[in-house]
Amino acid sequence: MGRIRFLGCDQDAYCASVARHVVEFEDSSGHQVDIQLIDNDEYFSNQLDSYLSGENPADVFVSGPVLMWEQLGKGFVEPLDGYLARASEGFDVTDFIPALLRCNRWDGEFGSPLGAGQLLEIPVNCESYNLAYLPEILERAAVGAPTTWEEYFEAASAVVQGAAPAHGFGQRGADEWHTIYTGFASQLWSYGGRDFDAAGRCVIDSPEALHATRDIVEALHVSGPPDWLNQRWYELAIDFAHGEYGLIVDSDHYVAFFENPEISTVHGHVEYALPPLGPTGQRSANVWTWSTVMNAMSRDKDTAWEFMEWATGKDFLLQSVFEGNMNPTRSSVWDHPRFHEFSSNWGSFTAVSRQLAEEVGGVLVTPAVNYIDVARRWTTALRAAYVAPNFLEVIMSAAARDIDRLVTR
């Protein structure tokens, strides 16, 4: 029998479910699985070479599109199509939401669209960026639910003026690459902006991108988190769950916090909608998938694949969704009567998030094996523009040229 190692991070519901139930796989297969969960911040820094190489490399690890692109460039990602071809009948790859499999196919070339090339990881949960708001706070501020980004920022300002002590809108601001990736990317693309043009030139200083950046920087000073530069995702989710904000466009994973009565004071009172429309009526929603990856350095790929089949299978993913592993990547989980009952008090969440996963959302950013470096430089620029808004255009243009030199082509 085989013995493999699974690498994940703490503070993650999927990894916790794997650790909680792995004995079930061991009992049924006869294999042994060593679980290694490391600090969340260390994991998302993506400096995992020491865990994925050497004498005892992790065989299976969790990752997402941007993180995985970097690992692919380092040679740590095993393509999976050959394994899918011999998957057991019960695995049923057609049960996965097609868009979520497409966004995990890539040929590794800068600028090549996702959806081409081999499958590089199997999604175990998906995250898009919805609008969540508290109708009670908006009512106190005498505003309705926004449908455009202009209305969103106006509503947040009204909350500050008329619904204190609540803050207006939640937004990540910490010096982390994913500050760019989440709600801000969804806003910028809705404005008609993007990171790179068709020729591969960085265009975060285009008129459309500057418009979006200026709007959010101004709004942050008026109605954003009071300590925006230190605002991390976890505290942001908890603060919203405690009723400290009127609105937020961020991860729809946060439903696991917002609707958990052991954590949240607003459970059952949150409403969910598609993210706002941009100035020309465009709606964009970025997507992240938390996925399992087979390490190309694995010494026992057959056992690693057996484990991946179990850890991404229908039964396990259904079980894990009730342990906080949101959102489902399999249609059978979305359709399961138990999940319908579980989410029945969450307003429009299920309809909105499924529409984001199946139709509206997509990985917006341009694939690059060093996109984390791109996002870090962009984040630094956005934070600098917040501190010195009068120099926003100069700051963003300098960052764009730096990124042009930085990107691996």
Image (cartoon, rainbow, N blue to C red):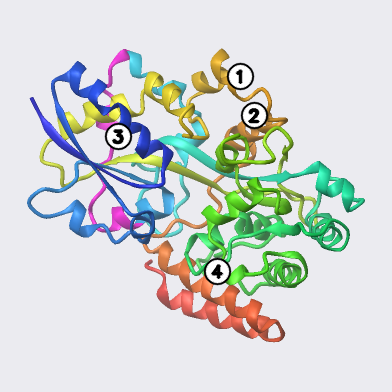
| Label 4, residues with CA under 10 Å away: few <14, some 14-19, many ≥20 | some
The mark lying in front, picked from 1 and 3, is: 3
Q: Residues within 10 Å of mark 1 (few under 14, many from 20)?
A: few
Q: Secondary structure at mark 2?
A: helix
Disc marking residue 230? 4
- Please give the name of the residue rendered at 38% of the width and 66% of the height, measured from the top-left corner: 409
Residue at the image point whose x is 24% and y is 29% from the top: 307
| Magenta span of residues | 70-89
Find residue 121 and report its image quarter.
top left
Residue 340, label in figure: 1
Question: From mark 1 to mark 4, how far is it between C-alphas?
Answer: 37 Å
Q: Earlier in the sequence, mark 4 or mark 2?
A: 4
Tell me the amino acid under the disc marked 4: Asn
Does the residue at mark 2 contact the one at mark 3 (Cβ under 8 Å)?
A: no
Q: Disc 3 residue type?
A: Ala
Residue at the extreme right = 142
Secondary element at tag 3: helix
> Tag on residue 350?
2
Mark 1 vs mark 3: which is more N-terminal?
3
Number of marks in the rendered image:
4
Q: CA distance from mark 3 to mark 4?
A: 31 Å
**Label 1–label 3 contact, CB within 8 A:** no
Mark 3, residue position: 19
Q: Is residue 343 visible?
A: yes
Look at label 1 and name its amino acid: His
Q: Are marks 3 and 4 in contact (CB under 8 Å)?
A: no
| Sequence-wise first label, 2 or 3 | 3
| Of 403 and 357, the residue lying toward us | 357
